[in-house]
Image: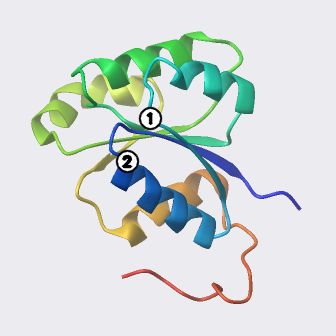
Amino acid sequence: MSKPLIAIVNDDTAFLELMHDLLTDEGYEAIIEKERGNAPKVIREKQPALIILDIRMDHPESGMQILEVVRLDPQTSHIPVIVCSADHRFLVEKEPLLREKRCDILEKPFDLPDLLEKVQSQLGQPARSASSAGRRPG
């Protein structure tokens, strides 16, 4: 049984590495993309089961532009997206638009169990190795 693939798009290298390690430890396969211009192409090619997208990256509209391209492309429009950001005000202002674009929203900083709950609600529980079964980051 193959592991669900999750694409993580963010401009923070430390965040990308943390997310990659967390998700792979939980039984998912993860790909990371730091280059905003490359993200839609990678998503189209890899066809992940889920995208975790930082909506406010190096340029304030970067994440929204990526989301627009993903939603407009018939090859990627079906992929669920979890949008995250530390910009609370932006998330509140854009919540109706993000919901319209079928995005789940997660404000940073977030608790790892909250992230995993959102991932599992989209993808279900992955098959995990015996060493990680039952472990819950806290």
Does any portion of residue 1 appear in the rendered image? yes
**Image position, residue 97 (x, y; %):** 32, 22
Does any portion of residue 77 appear in the rendered image? no
Report the residue that reaches farthest toward the left.
89
| Element class at badge 2 | helix
Looking at the image, residue 88 lies above or below residue 69? below
Looking at the image, residue 113 lies above or below residue 78? below
Task: Give the total of numbered labels.
Answer: 2
Q: Colour mode?
A: rainbow
Amino acid bearing label 2: Thr
Give 95 or 34, whichever is nearer the viewer. 34
Residue under the image location 62 percent in, 19 percent down? 41
Crowding near the residue tagged with mark 2, few <14, some 14–19, many ≥20 C-alpha atoms within 10 Å: few
Q: Residue at label 2?
A: 13
Crowding near the residue tagged with mark 1, few <14, some 14–19, many ≥20 C-alpha atoms within 10 Å: some
Residue under the image location 63 percent in, 27 percent down? 42
Q: Earlier in the sequence, mark 2 or mark 1?
A: 2
Tell me the quarter of the picture where residue 94 sits: top left
Residue under the image location 71 percent in, 18 percent down? 75
Q: Residue at label 1?
A: 34
Do labels 2 and 1 touch, CB within 8 Å?
Answer: yes
**Image position, residue 77 (x, y; %):** 61, 21
Looking at the image, residue 119 lies above or below residue 100? below
Amino acid bearing label 1: Lys
Give 134 or 12, whichever is nearer the viewer. 12
Tell me: 58 left or right of 118.
left
In the picture, the disc for residue 111 is: none
Query: CA gap, disc 2 to disc 1?
Result: 7 Å
Looking at the image, residue 73 lies above or below residue 34? above
Tell me: 114 left or right of 126.
left
